[in-house]
Image (tube, rainbow, N blue to C red):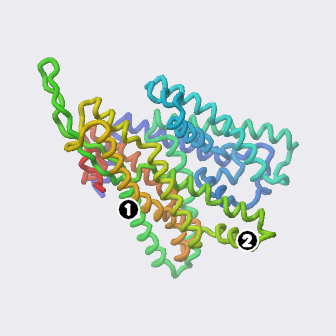
Amino acid sequence: MKKFISTVKNIFSIEDLRIRILNTIGLLIVFRIGSYVVLPGVDPSRLGEAASGIFGLIDTFLGGSFSRASIFGLGIMPYISASIVLQLLTVGVPYFQKLQKDGESGRKRINQITRVLTILITLAQGIGYITATIPDEAIVIDKTLFMTSALILLTAGTMFCMWIGEKITEKGIGNGISMLIMIGIISALPGAIISESLSKGGGGILLLLLEAVILFFVVVGVVALTEAVRRIPVQYAKQVVGGKVYGGQRQYIPIKVNASGVMPIIFAQSLMFLPALIAQIWADNSDIASYIGTTFSDFTSWQYNLVFALMIILFTFFYTAITVNPEQIAEDMKRNGGFVPGIKPGGPTGDFIDNIISRITLPGSILLALVAIMPAFAIIAGVSSEFAQFYGGTSLLIMVGVILDTLRQIESYLLMRHYEGMMKSGNMKNDPSSYAVA
């Protein structure tokens, strides 16, 4: 406890770090306040039930602003969609590949395109959001006027959220966009704990503690999955420049076991709503369609979880293939005079790295699929649906990833000022030897 108090004092004794933390807290408060500001012309008391399905997932990421018809109703989701589209375009379109290689000027151009695409996506999603989630009886002004004003405000809200995220990254601590998603998810945690406590009753305190212990080990497992890497040794040849010898040292390339992050779960979860949606169209004419609709509307069914897990495994291989380029890694190593001991530079090195990625992606994808379906097992075991979402899935992976990234940044500030790190074991330090080796 003394070490923790000492670490907190060290954190706030560094002026730059203290200002960044306060900036982050202030901007997050503004984001949370905005999520409660309802669109003009909407009667909140007439809004429908809480969002479910894919809408429920979005509402979780946005901290409830989606279901409240807030000016931040779409949050930063259009920006994330635009970023994913640009990321995919940089893989298959030569123009965007060239921009990516142009350094700072190319990144600025990609950011400009991302912003424009964000506005277009926000307008398109805004129309669907208004028509699908806000009932006519909740609109108390002229519908045409409401549609126009709501689209303008939703677009402005999304751009403002994007600005908040960028300011957190620039003047705060951690990745701003990810921080906004995490704070939206965490905002549901107190209510979920209260709901779970009430459902257990007065005599269920031991069961609640058992659930907390299980959740702790689940979080530890997710941290291990997030941090696990396969280190590839790289030897650099010695070079004599101006009478001085450079190179000759051995370094490591850390290849993540879960290089795709949460994207496979997001892709798979988006597609898992299609069978139930299509089945609803044919449910009156076919018993099979009715069975499919019923089965895939229940995310605790074994059929749903089996298909969901298989899709996550497939998407993990797909997303890893488009984001990690072994040939490019091998080419960069060759250009800088590096080589893997025992492997020829160039093509053979690329094949070697590709083989390693293929071997570690399979267990990584299986573990990711297990994490994704953990909430279903928690609900089957008797955990309330609100609390069960923290046992795995996208929510837990995002929270763990953002918290670890933020801790690393704080750790770097402490080490630069010669303070003792946040963790005595040094696992949070950016030392290659601290990586978990898969």
Q: CA distance from mark 1 to mark 2?
A: 40 Å
Q: Quadrant of residue 359?
A: bottom left
Mark 1 surroundings: few (<14), some (14-19) or many (≥20) residues within 10 A: few
Q: Nearer the viewer, residue 195 or 431?
A: 431
Residue 409 to residue 4: above or below: above
Residue that carries the numbered disc 1 in the rendered image: 220
Tell me: 370 left or right of 190: left
Amino acid type indicated by mark 2: Ser
Coordinates of residue 140 in the picture (x, y in percent) = 85, 48
Residue at left offset 46%, top offset 52%: 317
Residues marked 1 and 2 touching at CB (< 8 Å): no
Coordinates of residue 11 in the picture (x, y in percent) = 34, 43
Residue at left offset 52%, top offset 42%: 177
- Kindly state the secondary structure of the residue where label 1 is placed: helix
Whether residue 318 is visible to the viewer of this picture, yes or no, is yes
Which marked residue is nearer to the observer: mark 1 or mark 2?
2
Q: Nearer the viewer, residue 225 or 136?
A: 225
Coordinates of residue 386 in the picture (x, y in percent) = 58, 65
Residue that carries the numbered disc 2 in the rendered image: 290
Amino acid type indicated by mark 1: Val
